[in-house]
Structure formats: C-alpha cells, structure tokens
DNA sequence: ACCTGAACACCGTTCAAGT
DNA sequence: ACCTGAACACCGTTCAAGT
C-alpha cells in the first residue's frame, strides 16, 4: 500500500477542509482576533500563501466558519421544530442559549460586525435560514404575532450574549440551566 | 497674545484628550477594527510613538473609550432613575436601545470580547456602576425580583444588539421607536 | 492544479535621542 | 516631561516560480 487512503494528509489532499477544521479549533481556543492566517498555515503545516488557494481573504475564511456555525444552529432548531415538544418556545430558547455557551467564539463570530460590514451573501443566506426556523417555531406558539415573537427572540438572544460576556453573575449554588429556563419561561 | 489659550493645540497641550476625541470619531466612523494607533497618531498630527506616552497599548486606549461609554450610559440611566417617570422600566429600555443605536460602535466596544479577555479593573468598575443603576431601576418596578429583572434586561439588551446587527427587519412604514416601545412593553 | 519562497506595504510596540 | 526617528518582529496579501 504505497498510497494508502489512511495516511495521505493535506499535503496533497483536501487542504480546504483541514484549514477549516484547524481554524475552528483555533477560533474556539484563541478567539477571532487570535486566528491569523499565518498561524493557521503553520498549524496545518503549509506555507503562508497556501490558504489563498482556497480562501480569497481572511474575511472569507471567517465567513466560511460563521456559515458552518449557522448551519449547525439551524439543524438544532429544526430538530426542535420537528419534535413534538409540549413547549417548543422554551425548548428552542434553551438550545439557543446552550449553543452559545457551548461555542462561545463561534457564536460571537456569527454576529460579529467584522463580517457584517461588507456584503456577504453566503453569510446572509445562512443567517436567514436559521431565523426562518426560529420564526417558524415562535410563530406556532405565539398568538400575539410579530411583537411577541421579537420580544421572545430578543430575550433569548440577550440572555445568551449577557451570559457569554459574564455579565450575569451567578448566586451561590445556582444552576445555570435552571436560571436560563426560569428566565425564558418568565411571562 | 503670543501664547493665547485659544490656539495652543495638542503639540504642547493635552495630547491625551485630543487622542481620545479623535479616537471616538474614528471608532464611530470606521469601527473598532479600523481604529489603528498609527492612523490615530496621523489624524492628530503626531508621531507613531507619541500615543504611548499616554496609553500603554492599543487595548488600553480602547478600554479608555469603553469606560467613557459606560460613564455616559450610566449618566443617562441615573437621569431616568431620578426622574419621576410613571413607568421607569419602559423609559429605561427605550434609552438603553437609543444609546445603542446612537453610538453603535461605542456600544459594541463596551461589550467587545477584545476588552473582556484580560483583567481590566477600570472597565469592570465602569460596567458595574452602569448595571447598578440598571438594577436599581428594575428593582423598583418589579415585584418578582431577580428573574424578572434579568429577563427584562436580557430582552432590552437583545433588542439593542439585534437592531444594531440589522437582524430585525422593518416592515413597510414601520416606526422603529414605536416598535421598540411595543417590544419593551410586551408582558 | 496546488503549493512554495520571497517580497510588499503595512501593523503595534520599543528605545535611544532630541527639545 | 513629552515627543521624534528609526528600528523590530510581526501581519495580510501578491506573485513569480516550482512540482
């Protein structure tokens, strides 16, 4: 087996995928500011110019990461929508917050002004798809329509952001999951 | 009048203040990523190394900007708290969102992970002061205590962030102020 | 077709030297 | 005490050249 499939790494394989995987790890470990193209190339064992064969720019790489984030997020939301949960609003909110806490830097990147500056149709489509499923779930549950749906969304999103930023201090012996559920169920 | 007070600019005056003012303008115009120390020095007409006499690093400069943001924000909140508005919760929420929309990049900086990474006691103190007044107002109005206060805060903060990111699409002829009020008043 | 090596124009930051 | 000039070690990005 001179050219086995098992050990034919990115040197002459799919560098793009390897870059994305390494970038995701660096992003979650170091944050967006710590994710340099040269660092990334080094981590993957490739020259500084090599990533440009697969991504037009650092921003394009970040966009690709954010898009995969939205796709995973959408998948989670759709799972809630298609399950026959008694209270889909609550279930959605809890998963929304859980996703943010499980992938803090990816979540931040998805909403980062770094990407929203210029036109990024791929990103906007991915974001739109995610919010479609969101609207679908909230629309099912809420009779009062748009304003109530936006209020619920704002509360869940704000909760996720504030928790991520460490702005909501925990009291002694308080369970974060319980607090999240209590805040989401607040009427 | 050889050395009039009027035209004795930063060349031999208070460079620190001039830097902060120029930085605030650049921040709001270009965003945090567009605020370089060298650009700033150029804008103020001073050498690239000059700002280091007043700020230890770029991060320290950003922190100073965020602190002034929190101070202005706190001032607005205290004005609401000390006024005898009938519905302080609603008034607070509207001013919270208005502040974010009026100073989008400053508001983003105040909550940016760039600053929250390392220990920045000055920032944390300024943020704490702001949230003390917030808690004070919400505490007055809400009988149900902590969870309700956090839910209200999360909703207002989330609303501000989503509006800032352009995630909440306006319907035809819709007034943004009216929508904000409607969402905040949603019970 | 995909990657390397070397270069370009920038950064933030430091430090001796000027006034 | 406050600022300048020049330098250092980095970036992101480009481009000719290699395989």
Image: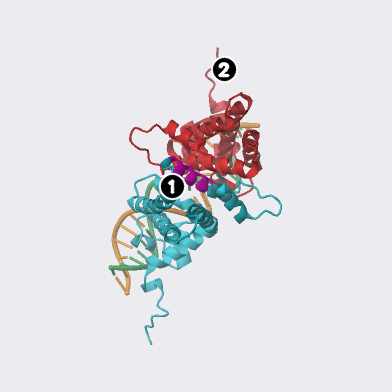
Chain colours: A cyan, B red, C green, D orange
Image location (x, y in percent) of residue A68? 41, 59
Vertical relation: B72 (above or below) D15: above
Q: Can you name the residue that lies furthest to the top here?
A: B1
Q: Chain of mark 2?
A: B
A153 within the magenta span? yes
Task: Answer yes or no: is residue B48 visible.
Answer: no
Disc number placed over residue A114 in the picture, else none: 1
Q: Can you name the residue that lies furthest to the right here?
A: A172
Disc number placed over residue B141 in the picture, else none: none
Q: Secondary structure at mark 1?
A: helix
Disc number placed over residue B5 in the picture, else none: 2
Screen quadrant of the N terminus of chain A = bottom left
Q: Residues within 10 Å of mark 2 (few under 14, many from 20)?
A: few
Q: Toward the viewer: B155 or B105? A: B155
**Side (left or right) of C10 relative to A94:** left
Q: How many numbered marks, from 0 up?
A: 2
The part of the image, by quadrant, that contains residue A46 is: bottom left
**Side (left or right) of A64 relative to A159:** left
Image location (x, y in percent) of residue B5? 57, 17
Screen quadrant of the C terminus of chain A = top right
Residue at position x 39%, y 67% in the image: A17
Q: Toward the viewer: B2 or A175? A: A175
B2 within the magenta span? no
Image location (x, y in percent) of residue B69? 56, 34
What's drawn in magenta, residue-wise? A147-158
Alpha carbon of mark 1 to alpha carbon of mark 2: how far? 42 Å
Tag 1 near tag 2, CB within 8 Å:
no
Q: Toward the viewer: B162 or A64? A: B162
Residue at position x 46%, y 48% in the image: A112
């Amino acid at each position: 087996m001179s050219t086995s499939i098992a050990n034919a790494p990115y040197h002459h394989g799919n560098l793009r995928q390897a870059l994305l995987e390494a970038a995701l790890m660096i992003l979650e470990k170091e944050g967006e500011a710590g994710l340099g193209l040269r660092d990334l190339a080094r981590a993957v064992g490739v020259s500084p110019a090599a990533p440009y064969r697969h991504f037009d720019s650092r921003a394009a790489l970040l966009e690709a990461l954010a898009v995969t984030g939205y796709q995973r997020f959408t998948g989670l939301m759709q799972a809630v929508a298609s399950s026959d949960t008694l209270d889909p609003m609550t279930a959605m909110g809890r998963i929304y917050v859980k996703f943010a806490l499980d992938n803090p830097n990816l979540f931040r990147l998805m909403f980062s002004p770094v990407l929203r500056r210029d036109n990024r149709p791929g990103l906007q489509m991915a974001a739109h798809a995610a919010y479609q499923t969101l609207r679908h779930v909230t629309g099912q549950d809420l009779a009062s329509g748009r304003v109530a749906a936006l209020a619920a969304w704002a509360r869940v999103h704000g909760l996720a952001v504030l928790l991520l930023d460490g702005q909501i201090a925990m009291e002694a012996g308080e369970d974060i999951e319980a607090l999240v559920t209590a805040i989401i169920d607040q009427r």
